Image: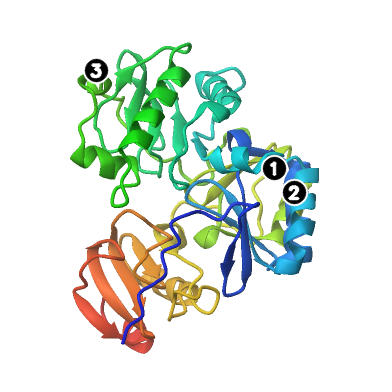
Amino acid sequence: MTQAPMVKGWCPGAYQPMMAADGLVMRVRPKLARITADQAAGLCDIALRFGSGHIDLTNRANLQIRGVAEADHDAVLMGLGGLGLLDEDPATERRRNILVAPFWTTGDMTATLTAQLLARLGDLPDLPTKVGFAVDCDPAGPLLTHDPADIRLEQGEGGLILRADGCATGRPETLHTAIPALIEMAVWLADHVTPQARRMAAVVADTPLPKAWTATPPLPTQHRPQLGSNFGGPLVGAPFGQIDARALLRALADARGLRVTPWRAFVLEGATAPSDPAFITTADDPLMRVDACPGAPLCASASVETRDMARRLAPTVTGSLHVSGCAKGCARARPADLTLVGRDGTFDLVRGGCAGDTPLKTGLRPDELLTGEL
């Protein structure tokens, strides 16, 4: 009998890590989507001393260390705190689920509103721990439309808007009213959350927002920037969001800082493009079309190995590919052209959908996937 994957319902922070099959998963939330080169080097050192030797870049632009022993949890917390990567208050750390458009400049609207929101975290209501915010105010239009957030600050046709995820339109705001309005919308969400609807898109599907909050459309979404583009440094890809800590240490040698994105890519500020094969530097690399979770044996919910399969299939598949160890689909929430879902040591195949959708084929062995047509 198939065992259903365990849904945790919360994200692994540093103070409240998640136990995986390979040890604790501890998450760092970079403020303003940026850490300094010294902070990044210190994080690499912690990953090498206490973790798996890798740093995961998540689809919320957070950084994770995996494989931490329970006995080392306090030592890792001390190390992260010493680097200035943690809030002193665990409650503040939990609330700081803020996705920031990564190409901000000092004093622009994205940077200013993020700083204002950070200063008002204590005014937010209690919300489900996966609820997050996006500050995405590039004058050319939003970049993070397809990335996970519940309440969004974006540019509309006439200026700044506040938009609830799941709604096509938002509410006009100014630099002075935006954060109070965001808190007001967060209170509305907290008042309407149910056990079945714990994220904004699910809530607004059943409960309409006030009309004034859905009056103005955002600007069209910008195309995602390609690897190799320069934003004060090269935009570099990490296969499956996994960064080799030793390779990153080498790449940081001439960098000022690291800017993180939710697209399995990061900017090495002030550096030259790395030639290390641990990184992806060209936009046409097939691995940039592929998402894969850690899979077995690293995750207890997974019954199949995922990333080696994804690497082998990537050059042979047209379009996007998602290889998921179980039906939760943690690596990719949106549909993929082809999704392979682990179940009882074999794979189910979904076309044009997500890991939890009804499969077109079931019970495919790994060798069948590698030798047959998909």
Q: At 52% across and 43% down in the image, what residue appears?
A: 261
**Sequence order check: which comes first, mark 2 or mark 3?**
2
Q: Which one is nearer the viewer's eye here, 63 or 181?
A: 181
**Sequence order check: which comes first, mark 3 or mark 1?**
1
User: Disc 2 marks which residue?
Assistant: 80
Q: Where is residue 282? Give x, y as percent.
A: 51, 53
Residue 86 tag number: 1
Q: Which one is nearer the viewer's eye here, 200 or 368?
A: 200
Q: What amino acid type is highlighted by mark number 3?
A: Ala
Q: What amino acid type is highlighted by mark number 1?
A: Leu
Distance of label 3 from label 1 (alpha carbons):
37 Å
Quarter of image, res 275: bottom right
User: Disc 3 marks which residue?
Assistant: 212
Distance of label 2 from label 1 (alpha carbons):
6 Å
Residue density around tag 2, few if under 14, some if 14–19, many if 20 or more, within 10 Å: some
In the displayed structure, does residue 119 sit left or right of residue 331?
Answer: right
Q: Where is residue 34? Give x, y as percent.
A: 63, 37
Q: What amino acid type is highlighted by mark number 2?
A: Leu
Whether residues under marks 2 and 1 lie with C-beta atoms below 8 angstroms apart, the answer is yes
Q: Which one is nearer the viewer's eye here, 120 or 66?
A: 120
**Sequence order check: which comes first, mark 2 or mark 1?**
2
Whether residues under marks 2 and 3 lie with C-beta atoms below 8 angstroms apart, the answer is no
Quarter of image, res 188: top left
In the displayed structure, does residue 149 sit left or right of residue 122?
Answer: left
Name the image quarter holding the N terminus: bottom left
Q: Secondary structure at mark 1?
A: loop
As drawn, 190 above or below 324: above
One can see residue 1 in this view: yes
Residue density around tag 1, few if under 14, some if 14–19, many if 20 or more, within 10 Å: many
